[in-house]
Amino acid sequence: MAALHDLRYPNSNLAKLLSGLLAVALFFFVAVSAVAGFLVYQIVRPNRTPASYDLSVMMGHPVTLSFPVAGAGGIREGFFFPGLRGAPTIIVCHGYGSQRSDVLTLVSALQDQQFNVFLFDFGGHGNNPPGTTLGYREVGELRSAMQTIATRDDVDPNRFGLWGVDMGGYVVLEVATTDPRVKAFIVDDAYSDPRVLVQSEVKRSGLTVLPMVDKLSDFGFRMLNYQFKSQPPVTGQLPRTRGVPKLFVVSEDRQVLATETMDMYNRAPDPKQVVRTNTAYSVMSDDSRKNYETQVVGFFLQNLPPTASAGKN
């Protein structure tokens, strides 16, 4: 009878208990949501340490090359390192939380073999305003860069090679699966969907011990990038790269991305290769990085030799 009385009257002890539990649950949900929101904010606005450049003292005689950014507006600036006149161009795409200055040694190694080489900072990185979409919008940046480079009279406009790591790898895959001018490409610790990198960063934060923080972070990122809600994972487009030489690099110390990259390697059509490394490119020792860059250069020399196209001598 006491229990029946408690259910009938809202001021009963049971009602107060239920109200208290509901308040605690609501507070916990709001707290976890706040944590997830803060994580997403940090992920899409990575720390930047813009580098300063003096092209007059840089090796390789680079020149500044500007190109428009479709959709985002404004002009993006990159460095073009000239190689053999009429040779193909390798575009080097840096990774998440990185910038073009971090891949200059790879650029030098490629230019030494007479490739034309181009690199630039993605949005939210380097000297650009903060804010990244982890690959969605950045695909358009790479496409715009290719269009501008193709108008030069000292390159082969129909032969491009692409290299990219994590975020840059996703961008490379999106472009390589849709642009026939890409004749060979390398992706290092790539992912099929930017949401994968969000989960990787959330896991790395150690806050996945909180229930639902991973799901709420994913939801927050999707809401921030709602315009890309219909963008499917790049995995489904991999069959379009049949006949295009490709190299997948897997780092043992980035397990989430390693799993993603191996899955894409297994799904990709021939010709394809896979290379395993102990550490990510960004944290390699000098010797390891030199060996890595030698492999990258060797891949492009074999599959996209820097010969001059007709009429470009």
Image: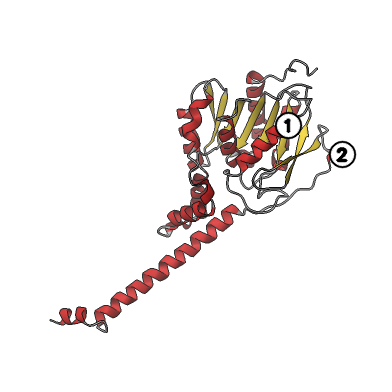
**Could you classify mark 2 by the number of other residues whose Cα lies within 10 Å: few (under 14), some (14-19), or many (20 or more)?**
few
Q: Quadrant of residue 25?
A: bottom left
Foreground pick, 162 / 280:
162
Foreground pick, 221 / 251:
221
Q: List x then y, in percent, for residue 57.
A: 86, 39
Q: Quadrant of the N terminus?
A: bottom left
4 left or right, relative to 30: left
Q: Which residue is mark 1?
A: 149
Give the residue at x 41% y 57%. 212
Residue 266 vs 285, above or below: the answer is above
137 left or right, relative to 36: right
Q: Quadrant of residue 96?
A: top right
Give the residue at x 62% y 38%. 281
Give the residue at x 59% y 33%. 175
Q: Quadrant of the C terminus?
A: top right
6 left or right, relative to 221: left
The residue furthest left is 1
Foreground pick, 192 / 294:
192
Residue 49 vs 288, above or below: the answer is below
Q: Amino acid at mark 2?
A: Ser
**Could you classify mark 1 by the number of other residues whose Cα lies within 10 Å: few (under 14), some (14-19), or many (20 or more)?**
many
Which is nearer the N-term, disc 2 or disc 1?
2
Residue 56 numbered mark, or none:
2
